[in-house]
Amino acid sequence: MENGTFTRADGPADAPVVTWLHGFPTSSWDWAPLHQALGAGRRDVTLDFLGFGASAKPRGHDYTLTEQADLVEAVWDAHGVTETALVAHDYGVSVAQELLARRGEGRLSVTLTAATFLNGGIFPHLHRPIRIQTLMVGPFGPLLARLSSERQFARALRAVMSIEPGTSELHEHWRAFSRDRGNRNIHRLLAYMAERRVHEERWVGALVDCDLAMRFIWGPEDPVSGAHVVPEIRVRMPGAAVHVLDGVGHYPQLEATRRVASAFDD
């Protein structure tokens, strides 16, 4: 735990580093099956963003993606990371875009070697939030957050996944999110949707102008950031590797772990 941020580094200290940025509303546990499928040979740096998983969940806090990017840089410093690849999903893609923007401005604390993105709102104008997300950022958001339940949480995850997880897996995700009553912060965490629009020009520019090796691993059945995003990726970043996983929804790393691992090998 660094400054209230749950973090870990796994793998040989001298191996190439990969930093994994998770999505909303889950945690770094998302990546565990993929790490296993990929095997050894890396140093995996993971963290739970502030407000998620085992990290601190302050009440009344204004959660921002830019603050989460600050925390990623602090985690790199804590683990002595000077060079790393990025892998990001959902909420984490915006944090990654902020880090890419800092790189482009010459003020990132590490050297980035590559970037991989899984389903997320990389182009805010194409983001299609599900109904409960829209309600949570409305005037009744604080009340809805207090009334949130495991049943509602599971329903929301199932709504964006094509290959549904089992009940026990969903329960573990809920346990992580609701730890220390973190579910009561849902409406505050969802402020990221508005923040994406504020930073849209800078963040999209950082992505499309990036000179790193870029890879996109995408589930087209995702109603939030699915098939409708792929044409924009191909047009805006023609040099990027794009892997579309038929039949997969918003969580490729959980729904089709081995297929995602294979995409990393291409």
Image: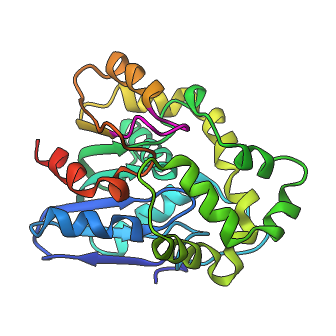
Could you tell whether 56 is left or right of 222 in the image? right
In which quadrant of the rendered image does the C terminus lie?
A: top left
Q: Where in the figure is residue 128, as x and y percent of width and height?
A: 61, 34
Nearer to us in this view, 50 or 72? 50
Q: Where in the figure is residue 149, as x and y percent of width and height?
A: 72, 71
In the rendered image of this protein, does residue 192 appear above or below residue 21? above
What coloring was used for the rendering?
rainbow
Q: Residue furthest top?
A: 235
Nearer to us in this view, 107 or 75? 75
Q: Where in the figure is residue 255, as x and y percent of width and height?
A: 36, 55
Image point 30% across, 55% down: which residue? 110
Image point 30% across, 52% down: which residue? 86
Image point 27% across, 72% down: which residue? 80
Q: Where in the figure is residue 31, as x and y percent of width and height?
A: 34, 65
The magenta stretch is: 218-226
Could you tell whether 78 is left or right of 5 in the image? left
Asked if residue 249 is among those painted magenta in the image, a careful observer would answer: no
* Residue 75 location, quadrant: bottom left
Judge whether residue 35 can be spotted in this image. yes
* Residue 36 location, quadrant: bottom left
In the rendered image of this protein, does residue 58 appear above or below residue 125? below
Image point 50% across, 59% down: which residue? 70
**Magenta: main secondary structure:** loop
Asked if residue 223 is among those painted magenta in the image, a careful observer would answer: yes
- Counting every numbered tag in the picture gives 0
In the rendered image of this protein, does residue 60 appear above or below residue 243? below
Judge whether residue 82 can be spotted in this image. no
Could you tell whether 84 is left or right of 253 in the image? left
